[in-house]
Amino acid sequence: MDLENSKAQLKKGVLEYCILSIISRGEAYASDILEEMKGSRLIVVEGTLYPLLSRLKNDGLLSYNWKESKSGPPRKYYQLTEEGKLFMAELSQTWNDMVIAVTHIIEKTTINI
């Protein structure tokens, strides 16, 4: 079994939730999302983030608006739509249930290393 592949799959599974969580706090610029993810040691590259943001927008979970920037072209800021807020609430409940279940299983596990 490939450990790096398993790690990548775990990361992909929570990436969408983390991005939506960041945006749920208020409108967010893509670079700010990348910085927060990096600061949390969940490294994401632009080539992963932008297609995901586009898909979430096309699914009706995000919208965006353009704001002028003091240091360059206008910037696209993302926010949750009403549908996105409902989706996020359901995802949060699922995440919380999963954390409880996984923690319950792991606490019973003894690993001999």
Image (spheres, rainbow, N blue to C red):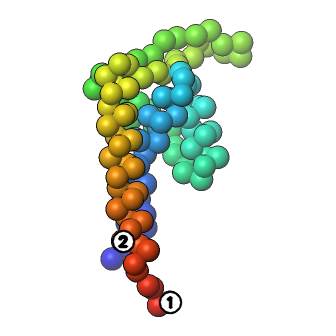
Question: Residue 48 at what x, y percent from top left?
Answer: 43, 41
The quadrant the N terminus occupies is: bottom left
- In the rendered structure, the answer to whether residue 83 lies left or right of residue 103 reads left
Task: State whether residue 29 is above or below residue 95.
Answer: above
> x, y (%) of residue 41?
59, 53
Residue at the image point whose x is 40% and y is 57% from the top: 99
Tell me where residue 52 sits by quadrant: top left
User: Is residue 23 rendered to the left or right of residue 69?
Assistant: left
Frontmost residue, 67 versus 106: 106
Type of amino acid at the residue the image marks with label 1: Ile
Quick one: 110 or 38, which is closer to the camera? 110
| Residue at screen point 71% across, 12% down | 70
Label 2 is placed on what type of residue? Ile
The quadrant in which residue 87 appears is top left
Q: Which residue is mark 1?
A: 113
SS at badge 2: helix
- The label nearer to you, 2 versus 1, is 2
Is residue 108 found left or right of 34 in the rendered image?
left
Secondary-structure class at tag 1 = loop
Which residue is found at the position 47% from the left and 90% from the top?
112
Q: Which mark is residue 50?
A: none
Q: Is residue 21 above or below residue 71?
A: below
Q: Which residue is mark 2?
A: 105
